[in-house]
Image (spheres, grey):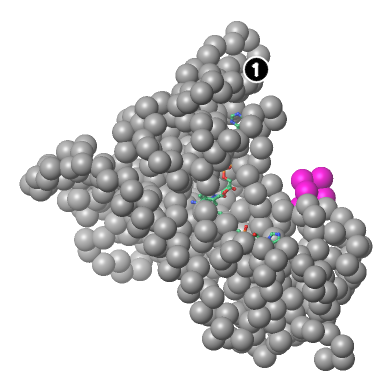
Amino acid sequence: MADYDFDVLIIGSGPGGYVAAIRAAQLGLKTGCVESRDTLGGTCLNVGCIPSKAMLHASDLYDEAVSGRLAKLGVKVETSLDLDTMHGQRKDAVKQLTGGIEFLFRKNKVEWLKGYASFTGKDSVKVGDREVRAKNIVIATGSSVMPLPGVTIDQKVVVDSTGALELPSVPKQMVVIGGGVIGLELGSVWRRLGAKVTVVEFLDQILPGFDGEVRKEANKIMKKQGLEFRLSTKVTGVAVNGDTATLTLEPAAGGEATTLEADAVLVSIGRRPNTEGLGLDKAGLATNQRGQIETDHRFKTAVDGIWAIGDVIPGPMLAHKAEDEGIAVAENIAGLTGIVNHAVIPSVVYTNPEIAGVGLTEEAAKERGEVKVGKFPMAANSRAKTNHEPDGFVKVIADAKSDRVLGVWIIASVGGTMIAQAAQAMEFGATSEDIAYTCHAHPTHSEAIKEAAMAVLGKPIHI
Ligand code: FAD
Ligand code: NAI
């Protein structure tokens, strides 16, 4: 290995970085991973996927009790909210999972270099006082909250997603700026726990990037649950006075300003790649206009020996995308062929019902050619009906000529689990007929996928 300290040095231990590190070590490469946080696991394990799902799960159970959903099933309980315990179980989940990555690093002999990394050359990185050389360097530095110009996040009244996970008490009125994934998930958490939640969205519809019909239906369902939406509206200012904030709103197209009072404001208008302070110039690298590091399909950057994966490169900012890229990049570095099919990456919003999709939206599919669409309502699915979960539908979009499945969209209580089947079918190049003629267990929510595929062929049974 000449005078290299590592075969592979990974910067960042999020789902991209830690998975790349473990796979590289499994492949026999001497591997190090630099992480500046006190714990491994990146955004996802520390302040993202995991703690948000802990709060979503617990708040949903609380909502089941207080909204009378449990009573309808004959389960009568007296309910009170113990927010400290709820936060405690969130912290436990994070601790267990981040500790688990530390265990996996030890098991696989991945060295954790604690500190902030910056390039000193094409194959060298400084971490604190230590300078290390590596034959291959993988940039997996992830992303951070996108700030809203003129709005200061104080993590007390005006919070980002990290602050919104940790609110010490339930706000009376919460305003969420941005009707995307974080806005809906964390807005739902606090709505369920008793806050009045208003979502201000710049566009005329929530959840950009999702199928049009799904966006509309999701809006309707969330409204029914009590979230209030101000669509086509922008926030032009947030003035904090003690424990409250006054927001100034304007129609997105311009017009008369109005104000809104809140005791919690969540800024969730997107995330941006982490490259600041990384010394990319020392490595001969630059970012694109969106601040991302460009790579080829093997995740190699413009500089030999430097690779990049996850939220810091183009594509959806999702943990499972980062993980798959982590495996692929390690395999490519080891001389194998690591591939990620970016056309088949599922997205899930973990509200109740869950909102999930994979592949093309109906709008995008129609731009490419003629399509056939099959839909099946969850209200006609026996299991959803039995469980009193009537909201949502499954929609299968197939090529009109070849019948090949181009996209699947689901709103259902377990949509996030159901979408895996659709992703697998699409990976195997399935047609809607393949799905329609696959035996699905009864009674399951997944039968709605089979029926939607049958609807593509024009012959569903239960509607
Ligand atoms: P990150 O997870 O961001 O990890 C990068 C790591 O690199 C960080 O720990 C950072 O400290 C470290 N780092 C950065 N620069 C340096 C440096 N110079 N030196 C040393 N260390 C450095 N995605 C999903 O798929 N499902 C979900 O349910 C989901 N929920 C989310 C909920 C929230 C509230 C948020 C904010 C995000 C959520 N995401 C979810 C998105 C997901 O967290 C990210 O897509 C994912 O973490 C990206 O992984 P990554 O490895 O690219 O980077
Ligand atoms: P997002 O991109 O999902 O949504 C941001 C929303 O804010 C958009 O609807 C946008 O139109 C709106 N917006 C932008 N500027 C605005 C303004 N000035 N005023 C009002 N609205 C404005 O970003 P979000 O929700 O912050 O999430 C960031 C990333 O984290 C996403 O890319 C997502 O993939 C990831 N994530 C994934 C989760 C999951 O997979 N379940 C959960 C949470 C986050």
**In this view of the protein, which residue sits in the foreground, 173 or 440?**
173
Q: Residue furthest top?
A: 256
Q: Is residue 21 above or below residue 315?
A: below
Name the side, left or right, on which 414 lies relative to 13. Answer: left
Q: Is residue 183 above or below residue 144?
A: above
Question: Is residue 281 one of those drawn in magenta?
Answer: no
Q: Residues in magenta? A: 288-292
Q: Quadrant of residue 88?
A: bottom left
Visible residue check, residue 223: no
Q: Quadrant of residue 285?
A: bottom right
Name the side, left or right, on which 234 lies relative to 418. Answer: right
List x then y, in percent, for residue 74. 7, 46
Predominant secondary structure, magenta span: loop
Q: Circle 1 sits on which residue? A: 253
**In this view of the protein, which residue sits in the foreground, 447 or 110?**
110
- Say what amino acid the circle numbered 1 marks: Ala
Q: Secondary structure at mark 1?
A: loop
Q: Quadrant of residue 146?
A: top right
Residue at the (9%, 45%) spot, across then down: 76
